[in-house]
């Protein structure tokens, strides 16, 4: 459903995305995980036609992004990182405008607006101006708007950034609900637990390059299932083991505050790049 | 094939205007009323231009000026904020509507703003019992003028990279045009080469055409042709700037 072949974006002398290649089959939730500035948003901007492609190729649902941008726009939905809703309009008017942009019939728009506002639990607030919405409600409306025209592929750029844990969980449930409807989803995030919880496969990006791509559990297995993490004061680098006893034995040899726990995707990132995601 | 998506863009702008109608109304009145009071009743009291009084002379110019300001600012400011601050333009750019339709929809909304502010001043003129006539050709010319400045508004919003750039554009392009385009004086009074210089401004031709139409004189076709030329060229440049916009 999504195919990238050496996709590259250069801004003057800065290489923002460097020969990114991967494929996402229909119905998959694919995550791009990496720190701020890794090139995740720039990749989404190229795939959604908002930024030009310097070199390489990208296809969405078999449509070439550079050659047929209008065709691509018909099959994609985008919920960007910024809450770019029309704040002077109501929730219903925001969806109405989106439906008109995608040339949905009046009857279809009416039915779809009701269906989606009920799905996102915003039906009661349909006539409220969006500027009066909380951050979580705005985020839910943003995702709802992105699927209004029934896109085949949905791009979610940092869908839970700035949300508290309870609201974040609600947005995750919403995304999983969309997956159940068969929508292919590409999500960017720098939250480890988000990538772990939501994504069928994860591509780890750093400095514009894809450094690993696999299922979350496979990435962790490759690195080592158990991580031995020293406190910052100890200064020893983290080490990874597939055998728990071996990890505990290594930890007992270390001085100071040492933790043995299951490996997470941040550990995978550290093992691959030598840097922490949240640096 | 004509992309009818322009109507959706136009519809959204009309919805926004409807929601802030009183702001739009008061905003459209402040500047022309100030000019009418200052130049019409203040400085212009007792001044005669040809056979008529000064109020009859400046009113068509103020209508042209007001239509320019409303259409240009109504398009450029909202689009600039949409691009730089709220990012709502992304929602439109990822929809299957062509850049030309986006441009046309925005410009038509600017035309409505320009025509609306022109109608307000015409109403004031009728209350003041000015010796002018306002027929369909007059309002058609206001529309043409508003179309050209709406297109300039799209172009300015696409090319500027900050709110400061937008202010500078208004200060260095729009403000001099407002004062030098024969709104408050006849371009014929200026010596060369200044007379030729102000004929470069589209607003000069708008003022000339509207003044001729309001006073039932022969309409200089060259003024309408220049205005039409500006409208076409600025529309093409505005459409290209939307097409090339990268966020």
Image (spheres, coloured by chain):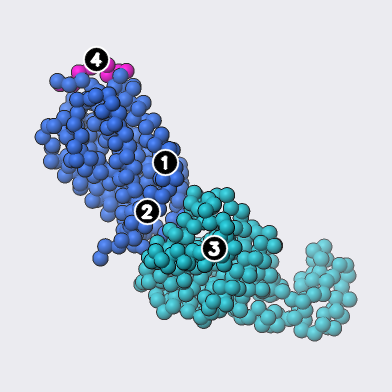
Q: Which residue is mark 2?
A: B11
- Give neighbour class at mark 2: few <14, some 14-19, many 20+ (Cα, 10 Å): some
Per the image, label 2 sits on a secondary structure element best described as helix
Residue stretch rendered in magenta on the structure:
B42-50
Q: Are marks 1 and 2 on the same chain?
A: yes
> In the rendering, at what x and y percent does residue A147 appear?
50, 68
Q: Which residue is mark 1?
A: B21
Give the left or right position of residue B97, taking residue A225 as reference: left
Q: Is residue B175 left or right of residue B164?
A: left
Tag 3 and tag 2, C-beta contact below 8 Å: no
**2 or 4: tag closer to the N-terminus:** 2
Residue bearing the label numbered 4: B46
Q: Secondary structure at mark 4?
A: loop
At horizontal 70% and vertical 82% (from top left) the residue drawn is A221
Magenta-drawn stretch contains B214: no
Chain ID, mark 1: B
Which chain's colour is blue?
B
Disc 1/disc 4 C-alpha distance (Å): 37 Å
Residue B75 at what x, y percent from top left?
A: 37, 46
The x, y position of residue A23, in whole percent, is 51, 80
* Mark 3 residue element: helix
Observer-nearest of A144 and A82: A144
Disc 1, disc 3: CB below 8 Å?
A: no
Can you say which quadrant of the picture contains the N terminus of chain B? bottom left
Compare marks 1 and 2 and give the one earlier in the sequence: 2
Which residue is the extreme one toward the top?
B46
- Chain of the residue displaying label 2: B
Measure how far apart labels 4 and 3 are at the Cα level.
64 Å
Q: Nearer the viewer, residue B169 or B82?
A: B82
């Amino acid at each position: 459903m999504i195919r990238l072949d050496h996709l590259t974006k250069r801004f003057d002398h800065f290489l923002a995305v460097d020969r990114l290649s991967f494929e996402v089959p229909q119905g998959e939730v694919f995550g791009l995980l990496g720190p701020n500035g890794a090139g995740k948003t720039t990749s989404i901007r190229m795939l959604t036609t908002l930024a030009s492609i310097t070199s390489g190729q990208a296809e969405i649902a078999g449509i070439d992004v550079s050659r047929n941008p209008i065709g691509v726009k018909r099959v994609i939905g985008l919920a960007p990182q910024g809450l770019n809703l029309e704040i002077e309009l109501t929730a219903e008017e925001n969806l109405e405008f989106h439906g008109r942009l995608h040339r949905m019939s009046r009857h279809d728009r009416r039915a779809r607006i009701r269906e989606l506002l009920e799905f996102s639990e915003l039906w009661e607030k349909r006539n409220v101006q969006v500027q009066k919405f909380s951050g979580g409600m705005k985020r839910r409306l943003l995702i709802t708007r992105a699927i209004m025209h029934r896109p085949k592929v949905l791009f979610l750029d940092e869908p839970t950034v700035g949300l508290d844990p309870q609201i974040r969980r609600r947005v995750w449930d919403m995304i999983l609900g969309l997956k159940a409807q068969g929508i292919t989803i590409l999500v960017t995030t720098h939250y480890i637990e988000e990538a772990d919880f939501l994504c069928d496969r994860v591509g780890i990006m750093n400095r514009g390059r894809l450094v690993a791509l696999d299922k979350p559990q496979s990435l962790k297995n490759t690195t080592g299932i158990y991580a031995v993490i020293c406190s910052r004061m100890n200064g020893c680098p983290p080490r990874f083991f597939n055998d728990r006893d071996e990890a505990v034995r290594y930890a007992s040899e270390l001085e100071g505050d040492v933790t043995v726990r299951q490996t997470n995707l941040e550990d995978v990132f550290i093992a691959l790049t030598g840097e922490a995601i949240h640096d | 094939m004509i992309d009818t998506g322009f109507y959706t863009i136009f519809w959204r702008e009309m919805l926004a205007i409807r929601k802030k109608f009183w702001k739009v109304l008061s905003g459209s009145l402040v500047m022309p009323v100030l000019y009418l009071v200052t130049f019409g009743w203040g400085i212009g009291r007792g001044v005669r231009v040809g056979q008529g009084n000064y109020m009859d002379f400046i009113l068509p110019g103020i209508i042209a000026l007001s239509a320019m300001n409303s259409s240009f600012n109504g398009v450029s400011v909202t689009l600039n904020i949409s691009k730089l601050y709220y990012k709502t333009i992304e929602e439109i750019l990822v929809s299957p509507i062509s850049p030309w339709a986006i441009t046309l929809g925005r410009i038509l909304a600017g035309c409505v703003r320009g025509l609306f502010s022109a109608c307000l001043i015409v109403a004031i003129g009728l209350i003041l019992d000015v010796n002018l006539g306002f027929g369909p050709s007059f309002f058609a010319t206001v529309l043409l003028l508003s179309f050209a400045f709406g297109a300039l508004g799209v172009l300015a919003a696409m090319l500027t990279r900050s709110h400061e750039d937008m202010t500078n554009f208004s200060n260095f392009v729009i403000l001099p045009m407002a004062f030098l385009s024969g709104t408050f004086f006849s371009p014929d009074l200026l010596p060369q080469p200044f007379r030729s210089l102000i004929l470069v401004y589209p607003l000069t031709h708008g003022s000339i055409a509207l003044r001729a139409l309001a006073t039932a004189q022969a309409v200089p076709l060259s003024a309408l042709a220049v205005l039409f030329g500006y409208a076409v060229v600025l529309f093409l440049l505005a459409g290209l700037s939307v097409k090339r916009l990268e966020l």
